[in-house]
Image (cartoon, grey):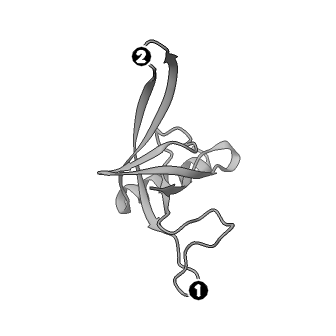
Amino acid sequence: MSFYDEMAALADELLREFGKALTLRRVVQGAYDPGSGTATETVTDYPGTGALFDYETLGAGQTWIPSTLIEGGDKQCLLSPAAMPLPATGDQLVDGAEVWQVQNVKAVNPAGTPVLYELQLRK
């Protein structure tokens, strides 16, 4: 087991202990059916473990600054990559009854070993 494999296992262990169960949902649009006027969808859920955080407030409680990518109400998610594909913009993260849209993804991936996924989420 390499050093980064051990770090990934440690990150997963900590998120299981201090985080909670979350589901990454990927919706893929299929072929358009002109007869029904709809496109088929394939929904795939990936159960996982992560932790949600509010972004820190800036200055006098302001969390949204024009011309930046983070808006008020956005959440940061640290997600374990164990048995999880790399999330993509447009995926959804399901936390109980709440569904968040993935806005940005940062993979902590030293030497080709996924250790942690950092997501920016928005309702």
Number of on-image labels: 2
Task: Give me the disc on residue 36.
Answer: 2
Asked if the residue at tag 1 contacts the one at tag 2, i.e. Cβ–Cβ closer than 8 Å, the answer is no
**Disc 1 residue crowd, few under 14, some 14–19, many 20+, Cα 10 Å:** few
Q: State which quarter of the image contains the C terminus.
A: bottom left
Three-letter code for the amino acid on which mark 2 is drawn: Ser
State the SS at label 2. Answer: loop
Task: Give me the disc on residue 76.
Answer: none
Query: Eyeballing the image, is 54 above or below 36?
Result: below
- At 44% from the left edge and 26% from the top edge, which residue is drawn? 41
Residue 79 x, y percent position in the rendering = 48, 52
Q: State which quarter of the image contains the N terminus.
A: top right
- At 57% from the left edge and 47% from the top edge, which residue is drawn? 5
- At 54% from the left edge and 43% from the top edge, which residue is drawn? 90
Give left or right: position of 122 versus 3.
left
Is residue 18 visible in the rendered structure shown here?
yes
Q: Which residue is nearer to you in this view: 28 or 45?
A: 28
| Residue 13: quarter of image | bottom left
Residue that protrudes farthest toward the top in the picture: 35
Q: Nearer the viewer, mark 2 or mark 1?
A: 2
Q: Which residue is mark 1?
A: 59
State the SS at label 1. Answer: loop
Residue 107 x, y percent position in the rendering = 62, 50
**Disc 2 residue crowd, few under 14, some 14–19, many 20+, Cα 10 Å:** few
- At 55% from the left edge and 79% from the top edge, which residue is drawn? 62
Three-letter code for the amino acid on which mark 1 is drawn: Gly
Counting residues from the start of the chain, the first of labels 2 and 1 encountered is: 2
Residue 84 x, y percent position in the rendering = 48, 40
- For the residues labelled 2 and 1, the Cα–Cα distance comes to 52 Å
